[in-house]
Image: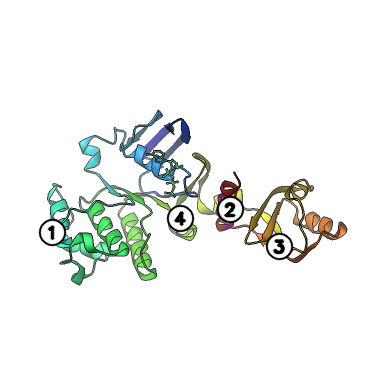
Amino acid sequence: MESVVTVKNVSKKFHGKQVVNHVSFTIQKGEIVAILGPNGAGKTTTMRMLLGLLLPTTGSATIFNSQPTQLKVKENIGVMLQEIDLIDRLTVRELIELIRSYYASPLSFEELVEISGIQQETLNKMASQLSGGQKRRLGFALSLAGNPEFLVLDEPTVGMDVHGRSSFWKKIRELKQLGKTILFTTHYLQEADEFADRIILFHNGKIIADGKPNAIKEKISFNAVSFLLKEPIPIDFLKNLPSVTNVYIQSERIFVVSKNTDELLRLIFEQQLPVYNIQIEKGSLDDVFKQLTSYEKES
Ligand SMILES: Nc1ncnc2c1ncn2[C@@H]1O[C@H](COP(=O)(O)OP(=O)(O)OP(=O)(O)O)[C@@H](O)[C@H]1O
């Protein structure tokens, strides 16, 4: 198998604070990989180090076995960051043509408009006056201008409406069929689950899971009993019950994560805990993500 990306033991400290902590992964040709994690998990920082936009404190990152800053690498990757810098006083049409002109074998103007879903009436608008969703489409078109082998997309669908998202993912699938390698970050767990071949889950600057969406869900899925309280119960009391691995709160509902929910239910009834509206929860990736985010709020 041919590696497109190799990240080895990469760390980053900002003002003494470790935001990426010894991260390593490789990406093979043709893979679609999602980097998923709560706000501040270190996803964008890792992506910026991978692209050579930020120097790692330790470790190294290569693309096509070369430094990411080398021209031959840059020519072969398409990048769409969260903020796109748009040159003032250029229309969408002019901007696409300008970026195309930097490449020896660019995709045709028509192909870029078609793939990115930019509407004809948008082409003559000033690029700086586009809506959030239109800017993402333009960013997508610009990232594809050089017909790259490797695409790096930071939160690609933010600001897109439902129709925009579904046509975007349809195009990503077509690009995969052409053998392209794609790395994207997302906050939409469903998108990662549905469209990625593999998910790398980040938390607190570390990779906490890496694998196929199903395997990840299996690995980190959990069962919980959730309920509302008639009167307060100390969180520590719940945390110390047998089989309980975590307790967290969402909108007044207490979630008690347990390896054995039958046993937990028995204890709740036996000890006549002051709870009502009891539910059994089967954890999904979404729940795990919320759980991670709630850890963050606690810390
Ligand atoms: N240039 C910087 N200087 C100082 N701290 C930074 C800098 N860039 C990022 N950070 C901090 O590093 C941590 C990780 O940020 P990063 O943007 O990589 O997270 P993320 O997982 O991409 O989050 P989000 O989903 O919110 O974009 C955060 O605490 C952030 O405040």
In which of the image's four quarters is ligand 1 placed? top left
Badge 2 marks a residue whose secondary structure is helix
Q: Earlier in the sequence, mark 3 or mark 2?
A: 3
Lateral position of residue 279 relative to residue 67, left or right: right
Residue plotted at (17% across, 55% down): 88
Q: Is residue 123 above or below residue 105?
A: below
Measured as percent of width and height from the top left, residue 236 is found at 74, 46
Instruction: Indicate yes or no whether the magenta region holds residue 177.
Output: no
| First reached walking from the N terminus: tag 1 or tag 4 | 1
The residue under label 1 is 94
Coloring scheme used: rainbow
Q: Are marks 1 and 2 in contact (CB under 8 Å)?
A: no
Using the numbered discs, state the Cα–Cα distance from disc 3 to disc 2 in whole angstroms: 15 Å
**Magenta segment range?**
287-293
User: Considering the numbered disc 1 on the image, is that residue within a helix, a strand or a loop?
Assistant: helix
The image quarter containing residue 133 is bottom left
Which residue is label 4 attached to? 187
Q: Earlier in the sequence, mark 1 or mark 3?
A: 1
Is residue 289 within the magenta segment? yes
* Mark 4 element type: loop
Q: Which residue was labeled with disc 3?
A: 280
